[in-house]
Image: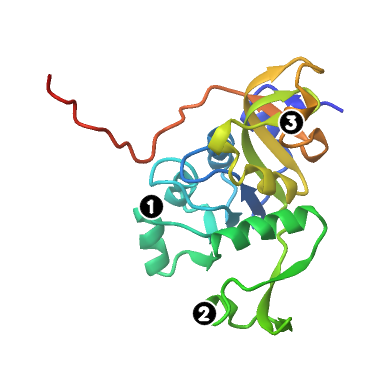
């Protein structure tokens, strides 16, 4: 089975369609599949729903798809750095489903593990719990959350072999693993593709069984918030 493709556009060929649900890895701008997001923009696919921790910033990450009005709904846990997101939401142009951050991660993981739903205490007594099934366990109230199964997962990794085994670099692992697991098809963009057998099995973060297509590319790795310290005088 061929998994390595020459470009992000080629890796997405035949997978995109209007009104689809896409799970995207990343946290802020760390570990986001920036090449695949650009390819989705160029493809013009519209009415998209994204399950992603956040929507990037105005001109990077999922933010570029908000600018082109290709996103209909966001399932997210944080959206604070995107002015266009805020504008579209307040104008009624964008649907938003807020999730507690751990709940969103578990919804993705559960979907990938074949678990249709699970109970959690997070959100009990808040707007998050409205309309959801409540159940008591050991005298405590829990609400049911549904697992997420996406039409497509797009993720960003550090290294891969040609079978799709992935290694993520430090905190860039973030939502990439659960996002990859919950996609019916998973496309990964990576910084380096190494020979088969060169990855230590104990260091692999995501087995290749979850990954269907891979593309290697050069990444901008933009910094979302740069904080520096004044130089101390001698």
| Disc nearer the start of the sequence (2/3) | 2
Residue sitting at x 72%, y 28%: 203
In this orientation, does residue 74 appear? no
Residue carrying label 1 = 82
Residue drawn at x 53%, y 41% is: 41
Using a 10 Å C-alpha cutoff, classify the residue at mark 3 as few (fewer than 14 neighbours), some (14 to 19) or many (20 or more): some
Q: Quadrant of residue 1?
A: top right
The answer to whether residue 213 is above or below residue 6 is below
Q: Secondary structure at mark 1?
A: loop
Q: CA distance from mark 2 to mark 1?
A: 25 Å
Of labels 2 and 1, the one closer to you? 2
**Looking at this rendering, what residue extends furthest in the right direction?**
1
Q: Earlier in the sequence, mark 2 or mark 1?
A: 1
Q: Mark 2 — residue?
A: 126
Residue identified by numbered label 3: 204
Q: Are marks 2 and 1 in contact (CB under 8 Å)?
A: no
Viewer-side label of 1, 3 = 3
Residue 108 drawn above or below residue 134: above
Spot occupied by residue 160 in the image (x, y as percentages of width and height):
71, 25
Mark closest to the chain's N terminus, 1 or 3: 1
> In the shown orientation, is residue 24 left or right of residue 84?
right
Percent across and percent down for residue 21 are 66, 55
Mark 2 falls on what kind of element? loop
Task: Give the class, few, some or many, for how many residues have Cα within 10 Å of label 2's Cα (few <14, many ≥20).
Answer: few
Residue 26: percent from left, percent from top: 55, 43
Q: What crowding class fits label 1: few (fewer than 14 Cα within 10 Å), some (14-19), or many (20 or more)?
A: some
Query: In this orientation, which residue lies closer to the viewer: 69 or 34?
Result: 34
As rendered, which of 199 and 219 lies closer to the eye? 199
């Amino acid at each position: 089975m061929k998994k390595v493709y020459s470009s992000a556009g080629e890796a997405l060929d035949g997978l995109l369609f209007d009104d689809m649900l896409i799970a995207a890895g990343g946290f802020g701008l760390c570990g986001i599949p920036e090449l695949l997001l650009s390819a989705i923009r160029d493809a013009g696919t519209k009415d998209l729903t994204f399950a992603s921790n956040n929507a990037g910033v105005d001109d990077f990450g999922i933010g570029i798809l908000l600018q082109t009005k290709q996103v209909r709904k966001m399932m997210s846990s944080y959206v604070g750095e995107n002015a266009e997101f805020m504008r579209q939401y307040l104008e009624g142009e964008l649907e938003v489903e807020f999730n507690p951050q751990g709940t969103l991660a578990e919804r993705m993981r559960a979907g990938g593990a074949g678990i249709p739903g699970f109970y959690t205490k997070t959100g009990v007594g808040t707007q998050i719990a409205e309309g959801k099934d409540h159940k008591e366990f050991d005298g405590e109230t829990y609400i049911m959350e549904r697992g997420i199964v996406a039409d497509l997962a797009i993720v960003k990794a550090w290294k891969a072999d040609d079978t799709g085994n992935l290694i993520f670099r430090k905190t860039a692992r973030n939502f990439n693993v659960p996002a990859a697991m919950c996609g019916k098809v998973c496309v990964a963009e990576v910084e380096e593709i190494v020979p088969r057998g060169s990855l230590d099995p104990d260091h692999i973060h995501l087995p290749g069984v979850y990954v269907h297509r891979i593309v290697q590319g050069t990444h901008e790795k933009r910094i979302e918030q740069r904080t520096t310290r004044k130089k101390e005088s001698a």
